[in-house]
Amino acid sequence: MKNIKFLAVIILTLTAFTFTSCENEPIDSAINLDDFVNPTLEPTLFKVDFSAATWTAVTAQAFISGNLIQIAAAKPNGDTFAFLIEGNALGTYPANANILAFTPAGSDFVYWSINGANASENTGSITISNIDTVNKKISGTFEYKGYWSDTTTTSILPVQFASGVFTNIPYAINIPVSNDSFFANVDGAEFVENQIDGSLITNVSGMPDQISIVGSKTNGDSVGLNIVRSLTVGTYNFTGPLGAQVNGRCLFDNILYSADSGSLTITSKTDTRIKGTFNMIVKNFTTSATKTITAGTFDVEYN
């Protein structure tokens, strides 16, 4: 099995997340500007217990787009948490069917919520308890068993992350661009999307920026692509769920599929817009079920 680096975790995400904006969101009750706007709001907070200590972030940000929620939090030393949740509503989501990951400072690997030797293991959960659409804040709780993502190393034991809490984390919503286009056939039938999201993922921990493209339906189904931003016009192969250049990730009937093979061609690209074609076989790596994505095209703005 390949080593699973944090780059792979980020590549699997399909919606934008710009972490740099977090610099303006201090987690400090003494200087929380929201207290002046709405005194009923609790201060922003992100904390979790592990290794006999409480880890508390100094900055945090969330992003909601289509049927996906992303949350990230960091400390000045470089420690980061990053979550990707397949959903956009209140409720409890299983950790092993989503991505919850902790990156220690200076590491290329993570403690994440998937047991590489047993993907069906119940490793925990994340609960979205409140989405404040007026003040654009999201709150909830989480706990999970984190497995070291470098599967060539067997001496590192899992870490239990307990009593995790995130309160009033500011979130942004991606607004579709009206002149974007997206098309794909799924097993020969046209995938008729209700929304197209083209976004730039500005990554943390020195990972390369990526372009995220997602076509999604109101029922939560989605077809998405991730493309490393530095790639130029040309053809690139999907090389499995941990591809380093391009990746695909689809959700059909609440079942997650990742690109297993196929190719993506960039036909034109500027600093804010990308156009191309794609075909891929996507696979659910728990059941081995596959779907064939053909005639894929995209022409979207990202920023």
Image (cartoon, grey):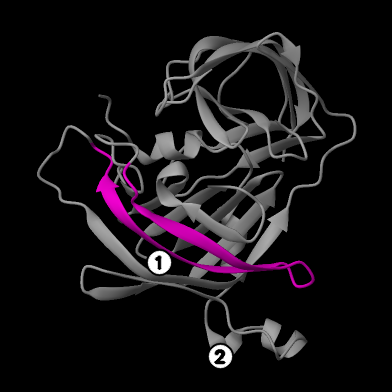
Q: CA distance from mark 2 to mark 1?
A: 19 Å
Mark 2, other Cα within 10 Å: few <14 / some 14–19 / many ≥20: few
Query: Which region shows up in magenta?
Result: 121-150
Q: Position of residue 22 (x, y in %)?
A: 58, 63
Tell me the residue at 74%/33% (across/down): 272
Res 30 label: 2
Q: Amino acid at mark 1?
A: Pro
Q: Is residue 122 magenta-colored?
A: yes
Q: Judge by depth and name the residue closer to the eye, 229 or 262.
A: 262
Tell me the residue at 89%/29% (across/down): 179
Q: Judge by depth and name the residue closer to the eye, 43 or 31.
A: 43
Tell me the residue at 42%/50% (across/down): 95
Please state, as top left, top right, bottom left or bottom right, where the N terminus lies in the image. top left
Number of marks: 2
Q: Position of residue 281 (x, y in %)?
A: 53, 13
SS majority, magenta: strand
